[in-house]
Structures are given as structure tokens and as C-alpha cells.
Image (cartoon, helix red, strand yellow):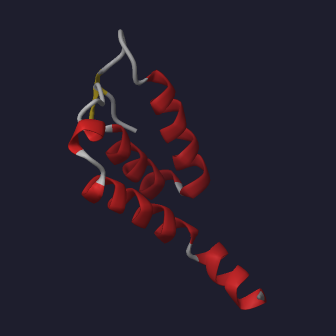
Amino acid sequence: RFVILIFLITQTKNIVLLMIFFYQRFAPKSIRAVCLFTPSCSEYKRISIQKYGVFKGVKKGFKRLKRCRPPNGGLDEP
């Protein structure tokens, strides 16, 4: 159990990025095309995680999702 816990802690970033990859690859286009921002919300979260780390990147991604409704939108870089 300890080995599994250490693995999960050390690979958290890769696991989250893999989940985002699967979402981008396999989620229906009708769901993914709703995003009002450029880059898309999932791409923004992926870039944020790579730039700031898992915890801060995920936090920035959720803040972005809360803003993803009219009248917001447009170009928004992490």
C-alpha cells in the first residue's frame, strides 16, 4: 500500500495530464465545442498544470471554468 501511495503522489501530474488527454481525445465534440475561450478550457488547464504545477494549475483551471459563460470569452492565456 505504501508503494502505491508513493507512486500516486509522485505521478499526480502525469495522471491529471493523462485524464485531460483522454477528455480532449474522446469527449463528444458537442461538449468540447462549447468553450468560449481560446485556448479551450481543457487546453488552458493542461498548460497551467505544466507551467505552475498540479495544485495551482488545477485551481487556475477551475477558476477559468467558472468564467466560461457569456459575456466572458476570447483570448485568455495562463
Is residue 55 in view? Answer: yes
Q: Is 22 above or below relative to 57?
A: below
Q: What's the residue at 28%, 30% (across, down)?
A: 34
Task: Please identify the residue farthest to the top as the structure is shown.
Answer: 71
Numbered-mark total? 0
Q: What's the residue at 44%, 53% (across, down)?
A: 51
In screen coordinates, is 33 left or right of 52? left
Q: Is 75 above or below relative to 48?
A: above
Q: What's the residue at 34%, 35% (across, down)?
A: 77
Q: Is 24 above or below relative to 5?
A: above
Task: Please identify the residue farthest to the right as the structure is shown.
Answer: 2
- Place of residue 21 in the rendered image (x, y in percent of width and height, measured from the top left): 34, 61
Task: Tell me which corner region of the image, top left, top right, bottom left or bottom right, holds residue 18.
Answer: bottom left
Q: Is 59 above or below relative to 18?
A: above
Task: Tell me which corner region of the image, top left, top right, bottom left or bottom right, holds residue 30.
Answer: top left
Is residue 39 in view? Answer: no
Give whichever of 64, 50 is nearer the camera. Answer: 64
Quadrant of the image containing the N terminus: bottom right
In screen coordinates, is 43 left or right of 4? left
- Place of residue 20 in the rendered image (x, y in percent of width and height, measured from the top left): 39, 57
Give whichever of 78, 33 is nearer the camera. Answer: 33
- Place of residue 37 in the rendered image (x, y in percent of width and height, measured from the top left): 29, 28
- Place of residue 11 in the rendered image (x, y in percent of width and height, measured from the top left): 56, 75
Quadrant of the image containing the C terminus: top left
In screen coordinates, is 60 left or right of 76? right
